[in-house]
Image (cartoon, rainbow, N blue to C red):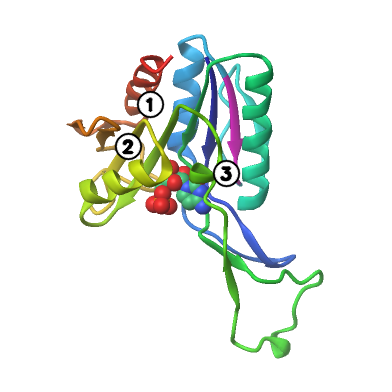
Amino acid sequence: MRFVITAGPTREHIDPVRFLSNPSTGRMGFAVARAAVERGHEVVLVAGPVALKTPKGVARVDVTSAREMLSAVEGALADANCARATAVFVATAAVADWRPAETAGKKLKKRDMTGVLRLVRNPDILKTVKCERKIGFAAETDNVLAEAARKCREKGLAMVVANDVTEKGAGFGVATNRVTFFRRDGSAERLPLMSKLAVARRIVRFAETLA
Ligand code: C5P
């Protein structure tokens, strides 16, 4: 199978030296990439700005903004279709939901800042891309399962990996995660606290059942 995976944050530039972003480190996506290679799959990892080493055997495409991430993913999925590979899209990236309406070409002067930053919505990569096997993430602070069910339906997913980021050991920047697999058929499987690599291996095994 060919796994196309997004990881890390995106950066949405205000000017060449300032941007909107979030604290995602990319660990979960890099773990999925590693786990997929271990199982002999072909992997394209589309990464936002992160400080992680590329796992062996992974083809990595570095991007900055959400729009660049979307076009890199579309390219990788189109290649998979050409090669008649069974494509799976796993979206772990913490994509910025908004971007500045305009990006200045030169550094803005402090005195020129008006105090108002006009924002526009970024594309939802997971919802937009056409792929029969999509796996998404839902990092929530409350109502975790209801939100997972909604995302599964609205984005046309085979599975949502849901986690409550207020729980200890789950969320941004840590090596562990505590997740619930919420599948298209309505089944929910709550996994114990485990390493992100162990979660990643379970995700890859699930993806293999979709082949
Ligand atoms: O709707 P929400 O942002 O909570 O959905 C999270 C899931 O959607 C994650 O899998 C994330 O990678 C993906 N996503 C995306 N593009 C966006 C926003 C979220 O691919 N613009």
Rendered position, 184 above or below 163: above
Q: Earlier in the sequence, mark 3 or mark 1?
A: 3
**Residue identifier under label 1:** 200
Secondary structure at badge 1 equals: helix
Q: Nearer the viewer, residue 53 or 7?
A: 7
- For the residues marked 3 and 2, what is the alpha-carbon distance in whole angstroms? 21 Å
- Give the image location of residue 131, x and y in percent: 52, 30
Secondary structure at badge 3 equals: loop
- Give the image location of residue 30, x and y in percent: 50, 31
**Magenta highlight range:** 43-48
Count of numbered badges drawn on the protein: 3
Rendered position, 87 above or below 183: above
Residue type at mark 3: give it: Val
Rendered position, 56 above or below 131: above
- For the residues marked 1 and 2, what is the alpha-carbon distance in whole angstroms? 10 Å
| Left or right position of 82 against 36 | right
The residue carrying pointer 1 sits among few (fewer than 14), some (14 to 19) or many (20 or more) residues within 10 Å by Cα, namely many
**Is the distance from the Cβ of mark 2 to the nearest ligand 1 atom less than 8 Å?**
yes
Q: Nearer the viewer, residue 197 or 161?
A: 161
Q: Earlier in the sequence, mark 1 or mark 2?
A: 2
Secondary structure at badge 2 equals: strand
Rendered position, 59 above or below 46: above
Mark 3 or mark 1, which is nearer to you? 1
**Residue identifier under label 3:** 50
- Give the image location of residue 147, x and y in percent: 27, 51
Instruction: Say whether residue 156 is visible.
Output: yes
